[in-house]
Amino acid sequence: MNDRLAHTSVPIHPPLAARWSPRAFDANAVLSQDDLTGVLEAARWAATWGRRQPVRYVAGRRGGDTFTTLAGLLNRGNSYAHAAGALILVSVDEGEDANTATYAALDAGAAIANLSIEAVARGLVVHPMAGFDTDGAGQLTPGLRPLAIVAVGALGDYADADPSIVERDSLPRERLPLEQIVIPLASGPR
């Protein structure tokens, strides 16, 4: 997979430009405990509404019981993540009111973003996934709302990947241009 860097109108921080969500993980690479701790630390230090820190994690490295449990929750379409070095379930404590629930999800997004950039900075790749058994995940974390499972690991060799994964991951990286997502106000500069 060549040229996976984001094409931006001005240069951005290299790990941000390099972040993408591949589906080919190296099943032989071992994710160190330090790397797993590092990405979790990055997630822990993400912005949080009102200093509330509602995001919680269940993390397991490949070969361990926690990883096996989390892998068992994945939908069939996400089975590629069984080759990842670690799986991290991201859940939130939604609190007792609608604002807290809304901002808890925002905090989780920020945490996943921080985790992803730290992984890239460590030479790793990540793939956040929504396709998993949320009821089963909820049983692992009573009182919390499961939002995503994030696969973390070393990039695999696409020569060994399933052709459907190669096809999907070969698609161009595209985002809407800034002109379509930044809404100018009627007066004043942007």
Image (tube, rainbow, N blue to C red):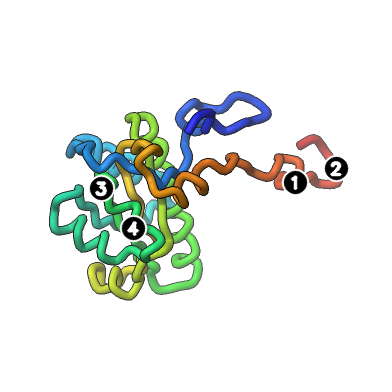
Say what secondary structure mark 3 lies in.
strand
Say what secondary structure mark 4 lies in.
helix
Foreground: disc 1 or disc 4: 4
Distance between the Cα atoms at labels 4 and 3? 13 Å
Q: In this view, does 148 lie above or below 171?
A: below
Name the N-terminal-most of marks 2 and 3.
Answer: 3
Q: Mark 4 points at which residue?
A: 79
Classify 10 Å Cα crowding around label 3: few (below 14), some (14-19), many (20 and above).
many
Distance between the Cα atoms at labels 1 and 2? 18 Å
Classify 10 Å Cα crowding around label 4: few (below 14), some (14-19), many (20 and above).
some
Q: Name the residue under label 2.
A: 187
Please give the label number shown on residue 68: none
Say what secondary structure mark 1 lies in.
helix
Q: Hey, what amino acid is under mark 4?
A: Ser
Please give the label number shown on residue 180: 1
| Left or right: where 31 falls relative to 22 | left
Identified at 23% across, 69% down, the residue is 140
Foreground: disc 1 or disc 3: 3
Distance between the Cα atoms at labels 1 and 4? 35 Å
Residue 111 shows up from this direction? no
Q: Is residue 76 above or below residue 38?
A: below
Residue 177 shows up from this direction? yes
The image shows residue 125 at horizontal and vertical percentages of: 37, 39
